[in-house]
Image (cartoon, rainbow, N blue to C red):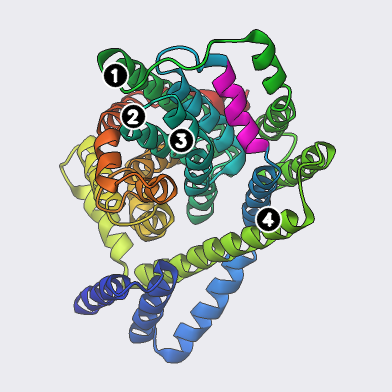
Amino acid sequence: MLTFTAILVLLAVLMAIRIPIAFAMGIAGFLGLSVQLGLRPAFAVLERTFFDTSASFILVAIPLFILMAELLTAGDVTRRAIVACQSWIGHVKGGLAMATVAASVLLAALVGSSTASTAAMAASAFPEMRRHNYSDRLSAAVVSVGGTLAVVVPPSIVLVVYGVLTETSIGKLFIAGILPGLLTAAGLAVVIKIIAHTTDQAPKGDPFVLKTAISQSRHVIPMVLLMVAVIGAIYGGIASPSEAAALGVMGSLIIVLFQRTLRFAAFNKSVSGAIRATVMIVTIVACSAIFSNYLAFTRITHSLLEFVATTDMPREAIMAIIILALLVMGMFMDQLAILSLAMPLAFPTAMALDYDPVWFGIVVTKTVEIGLLTPPLGLNAYVAAAQTRVPLGTIFRGILPFLGMEIVILILLLSFPQITLFLPELMLR
């Protein structure tokens, strides 16, 4: 136990001095294995773990989904989606903000990355809201919370990583994320509507013009068809997530080439961006596996499961503790770091309590999504602040009412598992 405590302290120190989470976990896990097993067996575990993890076929989905998002963003398709949504509902009070949320759903279904979605919204939607005299506080907050939809709405990279770490069906996770994602978007729209009618932060936009709305929407139709094809292929059992991701890349490339919006330099940048993001994610997954192996050899996980099996605490109380721990971690860490650190212990505990792994994945994903909005880290707020030049304190104040709605939706998902499991169960029929 003394060695385990020392390894945890080492891990905390490495993260405190800003060593990347992947390397911090890899170093701590390897040193722990060396103490536990000896140097030569530790190297053997290191070699086997890196190969087994990085050679996993399901990881192919990660670079493909990222590349699909990069191509569509470079080809100006995502900006056009924002403009199309604004042309339909931007004329009502608070309409531009609600259109930003609607566009965030479309963007989430294509981007899969919360920070990328927030950056795109900050560059496209924020200037439009400012032009129509929306308060910077509301505009920057909407951009920040809209970006979090990419964490739950498929094809979420966070869901892929959770699926890899826990060996849960990524196809079922994707389908399970649809209703919670739409419920979250509806909740955010309700908050915007309340703010629009109780304050002067969200005036009306330009008058509605049907011809303009139809004209703007034609650019988005191929993107929506691609989104339906990718998710539909997974839902119908026609393709695995990796195969659907390949379909998405091919479809996105056809769209941007047909619309003639992709330059060769932008294509190169898209490919290199996808490679960088993929290397980072795979490294996190591999180093997390090293740390998980160390936990397995220390029998910490086994001891925790024995405690769960013998404790008199109701399983709801244990789940509440897990959720609270994830929320606290979300105040200081990004979502992938939370998954890699927490899942080796949290997932076996949830399974011992007889929770559904797909439901647990969506609940965990929703919880780390909330962490993207909470200070002091609040990664999405930092991205929005950097893009919009709005003070960070102003953004966090604007996020508060949305944060309340996020907590309400999390409680709904915890209380009514069928919200999450309804669509995945239909896949089996």
- Residue at image coords 28%, 31%: 407
Q: What residue is shown with label 2?
A: 135
State which region is magenta: 77-87
Q: Is residue 186 visible?
A: yes
Q: Tag 3: residue type?
A: Phe
Q: Which residue is label 4 attached to? A: 270
**Which mark sits nearer the N-terminus, 4 or 1?**
1
Using residue 272 as the reference point, say whether residue 401 is left or right of it: left
Q: Secondary structure at mark 2?
A: loop
Is residue 358 at all visible to an observer of this figure? no
Query: Residue flagged by tag 4: what amino acid is it?
Result: Ser
- Given residues 418 and 279, the one toward you in this image is 279
Front-lying residue, 44 or 386: 386
x 56%, y 76%: residue: 48
- Residue 175 in percent (x, y) is at 57, 32
Distance CA(mark 2)–CA(mark 4): 33 Å
Question: Label 1: which residue?
Answer: 200
Quadrant position of the C terminus in the picture: top right
For the view shown, which residue lies furthest in the left direction? 312
